[in-house]
Amino acid sequence: MCPSLLSALPPNNDSPDKGIIRGVITDTNGKPAGGVSILLKGTLRGTVSAEDGSFEITGVPAGDYTISASAVHLKIAEQRISVKAKEVTDVKLIAEEVIVQLSEILIAGARGVRPTEKMPDVEGASIFAGKKTEIVRLGRIDANLITNNTRQVFAKVPGISIWENDGSGVQVGVASRGLSPNRSWEFNVRQNGYDISADIFGYPEAYYNPPMEAVERIQIVRGASSLQYGPQFGGLLNYVLKRGDANRKISVETQQSAGSFGMFSTFNAVGGTVGKLNYYGYFHHRQANGWRENSTYNITNLHLNLNYAVTEKLNIGFEISRLFYKNQQPGGLTDAQFAQDARQSSRARNWFSTPWTVPALTVDFQVTGKWKSNLKVFGLVAERNSIGYVRAINIRDTLNAQLGTFNPRQLDRDRYRNFGAEWRNMISYQFLNQENNVAVGVRYYTGFTRRKQNGRGDTGSDFNLNLQEADYPRNLEFMTQNTSFYVENIFRITKKWTITPGIRYEMVQNTGEGQFSRAANGTAIMMPRQETQRSLVLAGIGTELSLSTVATIYANISQSYRPVLFSDITPPATTDVIDENLRDASGFNADLGIRGNYKNLLTYDISAFYLQYDNRIGTLNQVRSDGSRFQLRTNVGGSRTTGVESYIEFAPIAAITDHSKLGYINLFASLSWINAQYTDLRVVNIVNNAPVETNLKGNKVENAPSYIHRIGATYTNKGFSATWQISAVGEAFADANNTRLAPATAVTGIIPAYRVMDLSATWRFLQRYNVRAGVNNLTDERYFTRRAGGYPGPGIIPGEGRNWYLSVGARF
């Protein structure tokens, strides 16, 4: 899932011994087609057409080529050309159904639907035929990108559940199909095709995500991505960042924003192409006081991307991202506090910070006309730092309320040092008179985590990492090593029918050791070295049948698994015992769906899914022969999730007329129904000093709402567009026991159903300028998406009330 090379590679090379290709691409009515990818097949050289449809590729060695123009919903246009040294070769390409691929400025006034797209069958060195995929192009939606409002960004992606931790948008917590949205940990989260999480298996929370203003598109592959991108049950979530303009030496983008609660944001980017070098960099800063008390935040993002075309077939790129933020955590609320005033906070001294640095090196090589190769080498140097009072929310954060003396705060620090390399290849070959594709790849990854916890911090209220004792009671080291290999092949049985089988081999090793805690007398309690190692083979197959231009049937099934994590091999108490036969969670995803579009007036994707999640890991109470009790961490059961994911968008006015002076309206509905139940869940309680085992079979899986519906309407007229949407989410349980009446700590209980309305608008004028504005939570609903057992709670984490934003930007 590499970002497109076309936007990364420079088109020009001013050598006098080479030729120039100059052309224009139009639709069948002779109108220019902007934003279309132009590629010389068999090379890495390409460009993107300008708004007037023109394009130019310079420095092309003499020879015969096939020039290709392509985009989603665009019929591929190809033409054979002959390039001569020191001469200009003129080309005119004509493509059908190009209206949806116009540039961002033109789209705002275009008639017809503006849907999410699906991934093409083949992109770069990856295969997506037969899978359920979506692409969200952020330049084509009205949404609050300033604070990464995920319910607006993913509005047209059915079944995406969201945890709203705070209004800063610094962490995106999403999931699908009844899985936990906890910092997106069921997804394989990537940026430009490489990992950005703390650890791909051991601790994969998304403490970092790029600012949405810097993202060109988001690629989502549901469950069946395990063969090419890892075994995660959720699938793949890849942020593809913007790149430098291929047709200009320098271009500048700036967006200045303000909003409720003192929010200020600035996003500034510069990019372009000079000779063989394409470059892009941005600076982003955002700060606010926050909707709740004690919820200030301060975020800074930096990014630089350089790509150098060594030859027509070899490109080398380097990029680095840097994040630093300081976020005050207001803590959770009890149910009574939430009902009284959801904006209140009883934690004024809790802070969180994650300095994050992600470098990556990319090498793209067109080995032959039929063989593309991509190598990514990436790393991570990062920290997770928190200081605060973390006791239950119903316990006061004071030693003496009258004197105003405070408890010492707990200080926790993680340090991550990761390295990985992934080599991906795409080979085309002829079989049964059809062009087939095989994707082959190998990956190596090693991640090191140093965890220091339960340190004694100060009694102050500011953010600092000052330890008041000699060391941390808990001081652990974890290591994850992973080697994997995959192969997947598209067999094109006919021009309309493909079958795509594949396999993936995984070898994973986790180790952990160090000091677990200290006894009351100060003696160190050590955690003996624990090691888990396993290897396994995953299999999957997908198929896709095009019935017509308006309907395509797809189906797939793919195995998934989640390995034993650091948290599983680290006992939470000294009396806990780890089952020596602890197994990885395993299962599979299956999809059956139909999707299509009709004349840019109607688009849809409706599918049913089945997710089996076995060998879930939990703890059981046990009693030894001597009568002592202990907690056994073991495999406790499994779950089954079924449901329907549906998306439909319709343009009623465009269906009646091609020329509406009053503008156009698009109606969309993203609807999903989810039934997530435990098929087996062993629970042991101690009764009369003896273990009594029961089974929670039939209980609902926690954090899995029964439905997630988002419907809306978009109005467009020339350079103006506005989108209204409503998000309706069903109730969910916060724990596997399906507790309804919340305890005083508020960490379990019902998460009630809720509805939230949003309104966003964009006005683009004079080709270069824009104004964006919106109101989030239009009706000022009081709701929450989660009950946290720990960070960032504990307790109820309220969703934000009504707030507004206003943004002014320009591109030069």
Image (cartoon, helix red, strand yellow):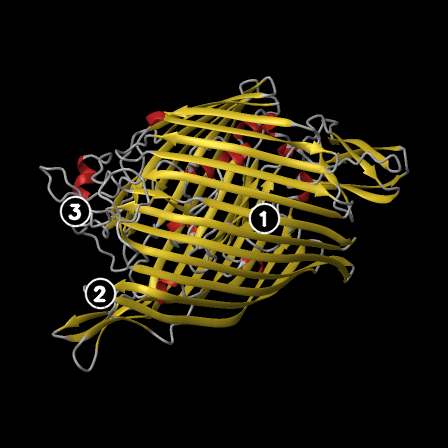
Of discs 2 and 3, which sits in the foreground? 2
Which comes before the other along the chain, label 1 or label 2? Answer: 1
Q: Are marks 1 and 2 in contact (CB under 8 Å)?
A: no
Q: CA distance from mark 2 to mark 3?
A: 27 Å
Of discs 1 and 2, which sits in the foreground? 2
Quarter-of-image position of residue 179: bottom left
Residue at (33% x, 58% y) in the render:
701
User: Disc 1 marks which residue?
Assistant: 360
Q: Disc 1 marks which amino acid?
A: Ala
Q: CA distance from mark 1 to mark 3?
A: 45 Å
Which comes before the other along the chain, label 1 or label 3? Answer: 1
User: Disc 3 marks which residue?
Assistant: 394
- 802 in relation to 404, above or below: above
Residue at (44% x, 40% y) in the render:
324
- Crowding at mark 1 (Cα within 10 Å: few <14, some 14-19, many 20+): many
Quarter-of-image position of residue 433: bottom right
- Crowding at mark 2 (Cα within 10 Å: few <14, some 14-19, many 20+): few
